[in-house]
Image (spheres, coloured by chain):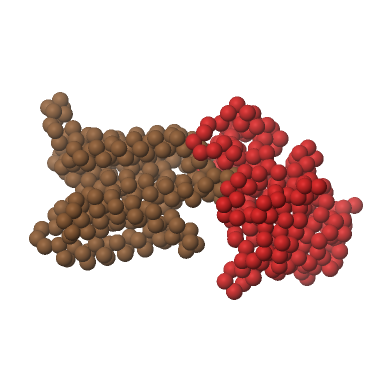
Amino acid sequence: MSELLQLKFIQHALLACLFGGGALSIIGVFVTLMDIPFLGISMSHSAFLGAIVGLLFGFDPLLGAIVACALSGILIGPIADRANSSSNIILAILFTATMGLAFLLLAFIPGPKSEALNLIWGSILTISRKEIWLLAIIFFLTLALIISFFKELSAVLFDREVAASSGIPDNIFYYSIIFFAGLIISGSLNIVGGMLIFTLLVNPASAAYQITYKLKIMFFLSASFGIISCLAGLIFSYLFNVPTGAVIVLASSCIFLLAFMLSPKRRIAKSL
Amino acid sequence: MNQVLSILNITISFGINKAVNNFSVELNQGDFLALLGANGSGKTTILRSIIGFIKPTGGRITLFGTPATTRTYKEMRKRIGYVPQTAHVDFRMPISVEEVVSIGRYGKLGMGKRLSPYDKDLIQKSMKDAGILHLSQRPIGHLSGGERQKVQIARALCQNPDLLLLDEPTANLDLGAQSELIDLLEKIYEHKRMSILIVMHDLQNLPRKCNRSIIISEGSKVFDGKLKDTFNIENLSYIYGPNTHLVLRSLSNSME
């Protein structure tokens, strides 16, 4: 095991698990409580489109992914509000539109397309130092914002209208949550890839929700479950030579199943 | 007498449908006004336009002497306690009763600031006034409908509001919980003398402390007067339609 930890790419992967898995699972608490699981898959495809635009016009695909996610994050909230529609509907439209456009542009990229396709499947073992730094910045920024504005965020999560009626600028916080989710997703694409990213957004937070009645504990448990899932994925894929992303997804699903079986909420629902 | 609310000729349309038509009302400090009407008459739409969730297509709303605009609402809402219908709030959130009540202080505190000992005292006092202090650490999802409604009232009270807006607070509650809630509202009004505007469609639950009532029918005001003058066949027919006679008999029984 100590030999394994000496390897540079394993060290990078461990840090990616900590920052990426942690950040995704923290923002997953918002995604789960706001009932917008489609956010993950929609943002992943926005990132995919951005990366393809980057490859097509000769700039860093990661930068393209981040810009595309940030733009989507800025637009989704206001469009859903103005269209008087559920955010999930707007996310579904965004998902199909970006996927269609991405595959259209993919046809114009000459030569092999593996760099762009990597963003769909992810590759935690090839993550670079630059990407680790990006993940660390996003992770600490998310943590700082949640700690600083915990009371406003909890009010908006409880009910936007109740928050607004108390004088809290609910729109700013609601749109910021979606914007930050976009940033985290684009920065974390290399961990599990776009196709599987929403597992880390939904599973750890849903498992945490089964166990606790406290929002602060839900954030803590969700982050822990996310990091544990990523570490399990990394270790098992190294030991048994199986795809990392798939093991991360399975590990987080097992944690959810365990939480569901032990959940006090399930017992209460059954007794009603 | 300080004027708290003035609505002047507001019209609210959703597409081609006019939900509120040329409606006006004034509310002074200490007034307890009931806005009555059948389902779909426009009561909730008027209430939501006062708090700024719906923008009138015409007319003017003035709160605390200042015209209500997108810019001025931010400050005005800190002086308004709003209790929405419980059916519109999702109670699955992992949050305790005390945390929900605390939301009432958040807007007044300012962004990023923590609750002071004064805020914490006020939160405890509001829970005590609403009779839910013993539930303070319970998850909100574990409460009954009546208890949840009391939590919302405690949250609104903890804002120290000058105007309290309540949207059908007794809807979906059993008879016991309904009368308990109305007693609570009467007690709050008796002690605090804040202005209250309550939207109701069930006259049997109307707080006796109401000193004025307005009946809305198809978005227009059809009656504005004292509560005791509200109960006649003509007025009630706007609310209950063909069942008015049955309701009137039941109302007179309950008044005796």
Residue B117 lies in quadrant = top right
Horizontal side of residue A173 vs B75, given as left or right: left
Give percent across and percent down for residue A43: 32, 53
Horizontal side of residue A52 vs A3, given as left or right: right
> Chain A's colour?
brown
> Which chain: red?
B
Give percent across and percent down for residue B4: 73, 49
Eyeballing the image, is A189 above or below B238? above
> Could you say which is closer to the camera, residue A58 or residue B96?
A58
The residue that appears at 68% across and 39% down in the rendered structure is B160
Residue A211, visible in the rendered structure: no
Residue B103 lies in quadrant = top right
Give percent across and percent down for residue A92: 37, 61
Give percent across and percent down for residue B203: 78, 56
Horizontal side of residue B99 vs A105, given as left or right: right
> Which residue is the extreme one toward the left?
A111
Eyeballing the image, is A50 above or below A23? below
Residue B61 lies in quadrant = bottom right
